[in-house]
Image: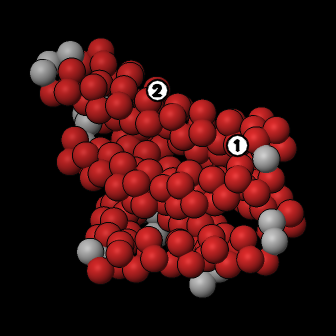
């Protein structure tokens, strides 16, 4: 298993999810209604697939290996940016979830907060994915030793196997594909 290739493949699914967020936002604008069930599915996708599954491999495995092997000074700036963007994404999802609750409770003005956090999250992650694919991952491949890359591969393979046993990937990719079909994205 090539862990970096796997993480780039996961980025493709996450990017597809970002398009669903955009469609959900456009739907609010066009209908003045919120598809709560679809938003809730997307929040679960983000929290469990994008964050716990994918970002865990980055933060706990790849980034930690880069910090350990290359030294904090060498990678502090670029990796700090990645950690900050992960945290900003989590914040947008929390704010989105809070806005959904307010709208459910009758605060229709909070629809704008749903749209704002959906679009902000999507924009943030689109740029973030591009930086990781083109810069961080490329840098890691270039400067880490073969042994370091193999350690990353083994660690990620173990995490991937545990997730596969629980059918995590299938569950969330299937949910994503159902939403893509519902909103005419595939």
| Along the viewing direction, whichever of 80 and 102 lies nearer the viewer | 80
**How many residues crowd around disc 1 within 10 Å: few (fewer than 14), some, or many (20 or more)?**
some
Position of 177 relative to 51 (above/below): below
- For image coordinates 63% across by 53% down, the residue present is 64
Instruction: Indicate left or right for 84 with 97 as reference.
Output: right
- For image coordinates 27% across by 26% down, the residue present is 98
Position of 74 relative to 184 (above/below): above
When asked about the image quadrant of residue 83, the answer is: top right
- For image coordinates 60% across by 33% down, the residue present is 84
Q: Where is residue 176 in the image (x, y as percent from the top left)?
A: 37, 63
Disc 1, disc 2: CB below 8 Å?
Answer: no
Real-space Cα separation, disc 1 to disc 2, in angstroms: 26 Å
Residue 55 image label: none
Residue 79 image label: 1
Instruction: Indicate left or right for 149 with 21 as reference.
Output: right
Instruction: Indicate left or right for 133 with 31 as reference.
Output: right
Q: What element carries label 2?
A: helix
Residue situated furthest bottom in the rendering: 1
Instruction: Indicate left or right for 86 with 179 as reference.
Output: right
**How many residues crowd around disc 2 within 10 Å: few (fewer than 14), some, or many (20 or more)?**
some
When asked about the image quadrant of residue 169, the answer is: bottom left
When asked about the image quadrant of residue 137, the answer is: bottom right
Residue situated furthest left in the rendering: 105
Closer to the observer: label 1 or label 2? 1
Q: Position of residue 77 (x, y in %)?
A: 77, 35
Q: Is mark 1 on a helix, strand or loop?
A: helix
Q: Where is residue 41 in the image (x, y as percent from the top left)?
A: 27, 52
Residue position for label 2: 116
Tell me if residue 107 can be seen. Answer: yes
Quadrant where the image shows the N terminus: bottom right
Q: How is the image coloured?
A: secondary structure
């Amino acid at each position: 298993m090539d862990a970096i290739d796997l993480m780039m493949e996961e980025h493709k699914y996450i990017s597809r999810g970002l398009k669903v967020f955009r469609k959900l936002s456009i739907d609010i604008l066009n209908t003045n209604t919120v598809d709560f069930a679809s938003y809730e599915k997307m929040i679960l996708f983000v929290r469990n697939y994008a964050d716990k599954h994918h970002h865990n491999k980055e933060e706990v495995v790849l980034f930690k290996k880069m910090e350990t092997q290359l030294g904090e000074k060498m990678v502090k700036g670029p990796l700090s940016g990645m950690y900050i963007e992960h945290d900003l994404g989590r914040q947008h999802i929390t704010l989105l979830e809070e806005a959904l609750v307010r709208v459910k409770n009758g605060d229709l003005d909070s629809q704008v907060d749903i749209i704002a956090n959906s679009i902000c999250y999507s924009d943030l992650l689109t740029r973030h994915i591009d930086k990781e694919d083109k810069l961080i991952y490329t840098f890691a491949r270039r400067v880490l030793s073969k042994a370091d890359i193999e350690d990353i591969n083994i660690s990620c393979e173990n995490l991937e196997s545990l997730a596969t046993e629980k059918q995590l990937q299938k569950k969330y990719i299937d949910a994503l594909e159902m939403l893509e079909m519902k909103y005419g994205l595939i």
